């Protein structure tokens, strides 16, 4: 079964959290961990991968933390997953040259599925996900008075 790992799913949540935090102040890893229910050490590991990929920036000092390296509408879910999971590939033979490529009738199907999967992840931005998260949050905080 094809699955996005926990690291990839958490990375997406962390990036949305950073987008929701805005640019007023860097988000501390402890605050992100608490808000998302993820261990602080695991958040740090993921943030380091995202930093290496150029998706987040770390800020030192008493008011340090992490911010997005680019506007959230310029960062795609594909960027985040590739930073944490590696190349998005439906099947190994899509990325690697397979010795059976000239006679394999299924390789074209795997390539087509891979391309579709990549298009879906590349079409969804962190900004769009943050907007959806804000919309869901506002729906959950309805106040009815009698």
Image: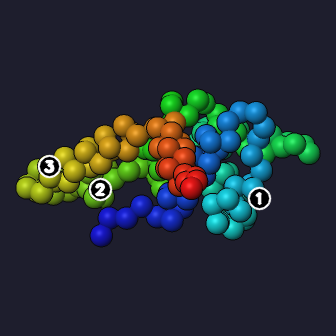
Q: Residue at x 62, y 48 (%)?
A: 17
Q: Is residue 133 visible?
A: no
Badge 1, how many Cα within 10 Å: few under 14, some, many 20+?
some
Q: CA distance from mark 2 to mark 3?
A: 12 Å
Residue 108, label in figure: 3
In the figure, residue 32 lies in which quadrant?
A: bottom right
Q: Position of residue 89 (x, y in %)?
A: 33, 53
Whichever of callouts 1 and 3 sits on the residue coming sooner in the sequence is: 1
Residue 142, label in figure: none
Quickly name the residue at label 2.
90
Badge 2, how many Cα within 10 Å: few under 14, some, many 20+?
some
In this picture the colour scheme is: rainbow
Quickly name the residue at label 1.
30
Whichever of callouts 2 and 3 sits on the residue coming sooner in the sequence is: 2
Q: Nearer the viewer, residue 33 or 111?
A: 33
- Residue mark closest to the camera, 1 vs 3: 1
């Amino acid at each position: 079964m094809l699955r996005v790992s926990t690291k990839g799913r958490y990375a997406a949540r962390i990036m949305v959290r950073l987008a929701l935090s805005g640019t007023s102040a860097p988000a501390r890893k402890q605050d992100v961990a608490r808000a998302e229910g993820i261990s602080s050490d695991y958040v740090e590991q993921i943030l380091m991968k995202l930093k290496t990929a150029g998706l987040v920036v770390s800020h030192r000092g008493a008011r340090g933390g992490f911010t997005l390296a680019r506007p959230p509408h310029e960062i795609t879910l594909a960027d985040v997953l590739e930073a944490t999971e590696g190349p998005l590939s439906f099947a190994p033979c899509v990325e690697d040259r397979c010795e059976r490529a000239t006679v394999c009738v299924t390789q074209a199907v795997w390539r087509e599925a891979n391309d579709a999967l990549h298009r879906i992840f590349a079409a969804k931005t962190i900004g769009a996900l943050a907007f959806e998260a804000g919309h869901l949050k506002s729906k959950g905080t309805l106040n009815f008075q009698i």
